[in-house]
Each structure stands twice: as structure tokens, then as C-alpha cells.
Amino acid sequence: MTSQDSKASPDDASTETIKQLRDSFFYGSRSNLNFKFVSNLTDGEFGEFLAELFEALESAVNDGDPATVVETINFWQVEAHAGKHVGESTFQYQYDDIPIAQLSKPLSECRVVLLTSSGHFVEGADPEPFGVVDMTQHQAEARIMEFLKETPTLSSIPMDTPADQVRLRHPGYPTKAALSDHRVNLPLEHLQALVGDGTIASVLPNAYSFVGAASQLKLKKNIAPVWADRLRDEGADLALLVPV
Amino acid sequence: MSVGHVQRAIETAGIPTVGIYVQSFAHVPRLMGVARTLITQHPMGRPLGAPGDGERQAAVVRAALELATATTPTSEVFPHAYRTVNH
């Protein structure tokens, strides 16, 4: 059974509740990872969001500027993920300590590594989750629950990889922006530019990416320490991390 | 939260880190005890900026690296709102 089977379908519209409507955007029949957050809202908040969105759309139609639409979506995305809906007392991975290392040299002398949970990989080096060849984004989203039990794997991305050889698949976030421009969460070129102007000394030959929608327990206990040792052994002085 | 685990492990291994988080997940590094974070007011999936907005993306990367020299836990908000780009 896929995650979509348990959600309301548009065919059930005559009996569909507002909650079913909201939930259908969260890996359901209307799955849209930009708007999956509406499943976290109350019915009343969902109504407020729609009203504000329609008003913003009307402004965009009139003046041709989508800024208000973006602001409205972002406001409600934040409200749903980081606002009063966040159950901080039940957040599983809270720590009182903050491990912090210090730069051993000036930034201009540092070798930097880039690591992101974006799900990027290089053409010809597909991690092939669950052994599936050429899994599509849609297929990945349909198997989100399986991804969340999986041990994450790290894809190496040479820093000089041509843009047309950068690939992406991730079941947990809206990927269209990153598909059209990987630099929105994989800033290979921007880091190289900082080497060029002397802000940093160099970058590791490879950046790294993994699918963050994975078993958090396996990642925390078994995988993250191994990755950290690897970056240290490769000579990183500083790590730039980009979660999505 | 996956990067939070990795960020803590890398710091524990002795390598300083900076993480760039979108505002929707700003609570995650705070709760997880992450050393240095730059929070951007960008939609989910686009922490550095809009596709095609290389200027903003580069500015975010530069702002993040400037936090690397912080010797105590630090979290800052990148002060500019998301902007769309005409392709």
C-alpha cells in the first residue's frame, strides 16, 4: 500500500471533509510538497490561508508581481512548521549540550567541504534506492514511508561537475526549484567563486549529498559519526551544511 | 533534522560547521543544539534563494561562512526576504 491509498481522492469530493482535503496535499491524492504543510493547520487556519492566498493571487494578477504570493505561502509554511503547531516537548532529538569546534586557522586559509541533505547525485552514480533503477521523483514521494526507515547513503559530487550532469531525487521537499537550478541548495559554483576571490583557501574535491528523509536513529547512531570522520580524514577545516 | 545529527557529529569530530536553515525549520537547530546557523526567510527547499538568483545565493553562502569564526553557539537571520527572478 502506498501512502496515497489511505488518503481521500478527488473522486470522493461529495463526502470529503476539510481535514481530508488538507491531508490530501500531504502525500495524498493531491500531493504537493510545497503545500503539504496545510495538513498541520486547523480547518479554520486553512480557510485563513486560502483567503490570504486568493487575495495575494488577485494582486499578482493585477500588478504582475508575485512577491505577495510568495510572502503568503512562506508565512503559512513557517506558521505550520515552526509556529505554535510545533510540539517542542515531543521533539525527539533535543539536547542540552552544543558541541562546537573552533577554526584552527583564518577563514582565508581554510579548506571547506559542502554537505547537503538535498538528494543530489551525479549522472551515472544514481544511489538507486531500494534497488530501483531510474526511480522518478513521483515514485520516490509515493515511497516516503520506506525512505524514512532506510539507512542514508552519501553521494559524492565532484565540485567541478557540469550543471547538466547534476541529478536530484528526494521524497521530502519540493524539488522543482533545485531541479531548475541546483545552486538553491547545492552551491558548488558559489563556493568555487569564494576560492577564486580568496575568501577561503580551497574546497574538498567532492561535495556530498544525501536524502535527509531517512532513518534518523540510524543516521544519528551509525552514519553521522562515520561521515564526520571521513570529512576530517579528507582534510576539511570547515563544513558548510545545507539542510532542505 | 537529519542535518542536525550530521552537524553535531562533525563538530564532535573537531571540524567547525555552519548550517543554512530555512525559517520553517529554524526551531530544529535550536532544539538539537547546533553550533552555528544562518536562518534564511526563504521557502522550503530553497535555503539559498530562488532559482536563477545567483546574486542572493552567493550572498547567503558568504554570510554563512562569516559565521564560521564564531567561538560560541551562534544563530543569525539573513536579513532579506525571498525574491523571485524573471528568467
Image: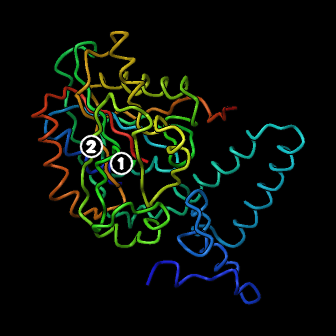
Residue drawn at (83%, 38%) of the image? A64
| Residue type at tag 1 | Ser
Q: Identify the residue position indicated by label 1 in the image.
A: A117
Looking at this view, name the residue that lies furthest to the top: A197
Residue drawn at (42%, 49%) of the image? A168
Q: Quadrant of residue B85?
A: top right
Q: Position of residue B46 (x, y in %)?
A: 52, 42
- Above-or-below relation of A86 to B28: below
Q: Dot 1 falls on which chain?
A: A
Please tell me whether mark 2 sits on a helix, a strand or a loop. Answer: helix
Q: Identify the residue position indicated by label 2 in the image.
A: B7
Residue drawn at (31%, 63%) of the image? A129
Looking at this view, name the residue that lies furthest to the left: A233
| Residue type at tag 2 | Gln
Q: Position of residue B33 (x, y in %)?
A: 30, 46
Q: Which sits in the foreground, A63 or A85?
A: A63
Assess whether mark 2 and mark 1 are in contact (beta carbons under 8 angstroms): no
Q: Quadrant of residue A152?
A: bottom left
Please tell me whether mark 1 sits on a helix, a strand or a loop. Answer: loop
- Above-or-below relation of A183 to A95: above
**Quarter of the image that includes the N terminus of chain A:** bottom left
Q: Which sits in the foreground, A123 or A129?
A: A123
Q: Dot 2 falls on which chain?
A: B
Q: Position of residue A53 (x, y in %)?
A: 76, 55
| Category of crowding for the residue at label 1, using alpha-carbon neighbours closer than 10 angstroms: few (below 14), some (14–19), many (at least 20) | many
